[in-house]
């Protein structure tokens, strides 16, 4: 087994176990206290998973029109936007937890707001990365067609 | 990490091939003109399939078009 495989297996086992330990009691508690909410989670999954799948297929189809250099710029921008999304969501979650949630609860409306704020800023980061890369090329070779 | 630099003779080969334009080469190998410009100037290291396509467009071997420096 090579070191990349070892690393992947170790992380999978560690995070998988941690997630199982944390998510099982949470799911059981949710099922006990909020059966209605759990039903909505399943409905969201039934709607969301196929929608996400088709959006992903459309995204793949769109990517086919770019050549390999453009794809490398896009890959860089996706990795930056994922990083920004993670950081923003982490900051917002901790802010909500430490400040807004001090009273023991936060308004439910903050959750989608946090998600959309993260998505919006991640999209901005992605677009700015592409624009920055293109501007760098324009400086070097003249305006891109 | 190695700091090898990939140099190339694309510009000279284009000139020798009846002054082939960057756009013509781009069309031949199926990429944008900007990719050819970036490759020609050594700013972008093409994938092996693209390097082979570029070499084939001039009827050359890959090593005759691209050289590894460093």
Image (cartoon, coloured by chain):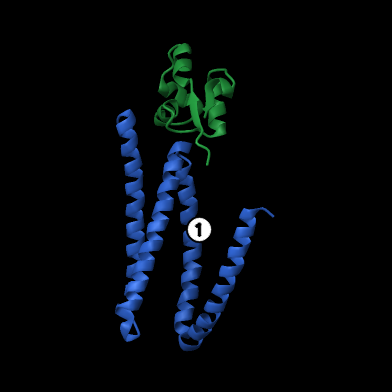
Residue A83 in sight from this viewpoint = yes
Which chain does the numbered disc 1 sit on?
A
Chain identifier matching the green colour in the rendered picture: B
Residue A52 point in image, percent of width and height: 47, 60
Residue B51 point in image, percent of width and height: 54, 28
- Residue of label 1: A53
Q: Which quarter of the rendered picture does the C terminus of chain A lie within? A: top left
Residue located farthest toward the bottom when viewing the structure as drawn: A33
Task: Identify the residue shown where x is 55% and y is 26%.
Answer: B53
Which tint is chain A? blue
Horizontal relation, residue A76 to residue A15: left or right: left
Residue A104 point in image, percent of width and height: 35, 85
Task: Identify the residue shown where x is 41% and y is 19%.
Answer: B21
Residue A67 in sight from this viewpoint = no
Whether B42 is drawn above or below A22: the answer is above
Q: Secondary structure at mark 1?
A: helix
Horizontal relation, residue A81 to residue A1: left or right: left
């Amino acid at each position: 087994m090579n070191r990349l495989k070892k690393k992947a297996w170790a992380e999978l086992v560690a995070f998988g176990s941690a997630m199982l330990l944390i998510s099982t009691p949470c799911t059981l508690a949710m099922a006990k206290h909020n059966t209605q909410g759990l039903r909505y989670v399943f409905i969201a999954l039934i709607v969301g998973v196929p929608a996400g799948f088709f959006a992903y297929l459309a995204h793949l189809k769109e990517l086919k029109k770019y050549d390999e250099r453009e794809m490398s710029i896009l890959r860089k921008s996706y990795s930056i936007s994922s990083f920004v999304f993670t950081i923003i969501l982490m900051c917002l979650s901790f802010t909500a937890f430490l400040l807004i949630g001090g009273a023991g609860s936060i308004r439910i409306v903050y959750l989608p707001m946090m998600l959309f704020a993260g998505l919006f800023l991640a999209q901005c980061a992605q677009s700015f990365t592409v624009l920055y890369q293109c501007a760098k090329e324009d400086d070097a070779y003249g305006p891109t067609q | 990490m190695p700091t090898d630099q990939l140099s190339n003779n694309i510009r000279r080969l284009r000139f020798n091939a009846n002054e082939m334009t960057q756009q013509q080469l781009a069309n031949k190998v199926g990429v944008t003109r900007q990719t050819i410009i970036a490759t020609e100037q050594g700013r972008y290291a093409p994938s092996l399939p693209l390097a082979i396509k570029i070499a084939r467009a001039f009827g050359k071997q890959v090593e005759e078009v691209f050289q590894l420096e460093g």
